[in-house]
Amino acid sequence: MIDVPSELLRRIREHGQEHVLKFWDDLNETQQEQFACQLEAVDFELFNSLQQLSAESTPVELHPSPIVALNDTYREIGVERIKKGELSVLTVAGGQGTRLGWSGPKGTFPATPVTGKSLFQVVAEQILFAEKQYGVVIPWYIMTSSQNDAATRSFLLDNNCFGLERTDIFIFTQGEVPASTKDGKMLLSSHGSVAMNPDGHGGVISALKVSGGLEEMESRGIKYISYVQIDNPMANVVDPKFLGIHLSEESSKEVTSKCVKKTNPKERVGVFCLVDGKTTIVEYSDLPTEKTVEQNDNNELSYGAGSIAIHMLSTEFLQRVVDGMPWHIAHKTVPHVDLNTGDYVNPKSPNANKYERFVFDVLPLAKKSLVVETEREDEFAPIKNAQGVDSPSTSQQFQRDRAIRWLRKCSVDVSDNANVEISPLSGSVPEELNCQEFPSSIGDGETVVL
């Protein structure tokens, strides 16, 4: 048995969290050492400051966000910067595939309709294609979680990083914050561990700094980051048009985002808005009911610019705002150890506060940002649910439909019922495809991988 390290004990007492040690003497020496390591890593000062947050929202002046179309006008500007080695890809991949009935990291989930390539492979092969096309290294930064970091690293190594150089992949873990009772007491997830909560996808920026990722980018000469989340296999992760329009007013623009038109007022996506004159994303659950159905002069939803979690970020901007990202509080149901009985309990209603940050909170921090509209059928088919909307079946159908459209642009006579998959190694947009390599026709029900 060991004693609690004196400096750690002082910090725990200073912040009024002595209760976390209630079962210390019940632990064996190994468990005590592990618990002490976890507590040493807790930022008690940050946790204390988070207790001042309020979940109540204040009234804001809300207007639809201006939107421009994404087109070919600025493509060559983007290509030039990519060839200079100024672009990187950043993927947020801290989640597990539990909701999909998948036991591993979500990035390992088989996503494509014919070959079942994983979500990680889809991103990796897009990067590999672009590296060969532009003759440059495009480093890949991946944010994992403490839960899936080891499995993610093993998966990539076991698959030889899908052809990418291991030294060009930078993997780092997401930060965590203790969950607390509503009166600011940390919850225990076991007799020897505090209940920790990932700090949200917005934690990617501070995690990049803490891990040395931002410094590593600077050493490589990276100036721009293509940000995507792992759950969307149709995201175009190396898009010169997107980078080009981001650079069209380089002196002032710091973040550019993609959107698609919402399919209906109730679609569960965040919406780009002007909030007190600043571009930001308002969560679907926070948008006033009357705004969700409001229509403009074109009989379209006024607040219909749905976020697809694709952003172009300038590294210089992230260096400036990394310590200024706001925190949010949410009341959630958190299983925990009852301090009175020592039993593990699963509450049926919200009993705790969780603290997180959102990546889109960088938008209002920018001196100037831009929102560009892209086509849903080309770039947005996320895999979030096991069945129904945004499920593997709907995403794979979107992928098939897109492949058929692209083949027809190549003058291929392809049936609507063909089971077709176009590899990212063949191109990420129709213009990149080598149509001469494709068959002249693909029949009804035929399965083809190109």
Image (tube, helix red, strand yellow):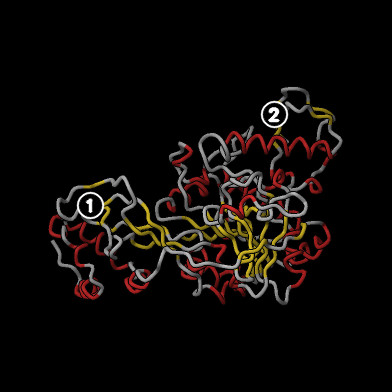
Tally of marks: 2
List the residue tagged with mark 2: 419
Q: Measuring 16% from the left and 60% from the top, which residue is drawn there?
A: 22
Q: Measuring 72% from the left and 30% from the top, which residue is drawn there?
A: 448
Viewer-nearest residue: 328 or 409: 328
List the residue tagged with mark 1: 337
CA neighbours of label 1 inside 10 A, class few (<14), some (14 to 19), many (20+): some
Name the quarter where the N terminus is drawn.
bottom left
Q: Quadrant of residue 244?
A: bottom right
For the residues marked 1 and 2, what is the alpha-carbon distance in whole angstroms? 51 Å
> In the rendering, at what x and y percent does residue 224 appear?
66, 67
Closer to viewer: mark 1 or mark 2 = 1
Relative to 369, is 32 on the left or the right?
left
Q: Measuring 18% from the left and 63% from the top, which residue is drawn there?
A: 21
Name the quarter where the C terminus is drawn.
top right
Which residue extends farthest front?
290
Name which residue type carries label 1.
Answer: Val
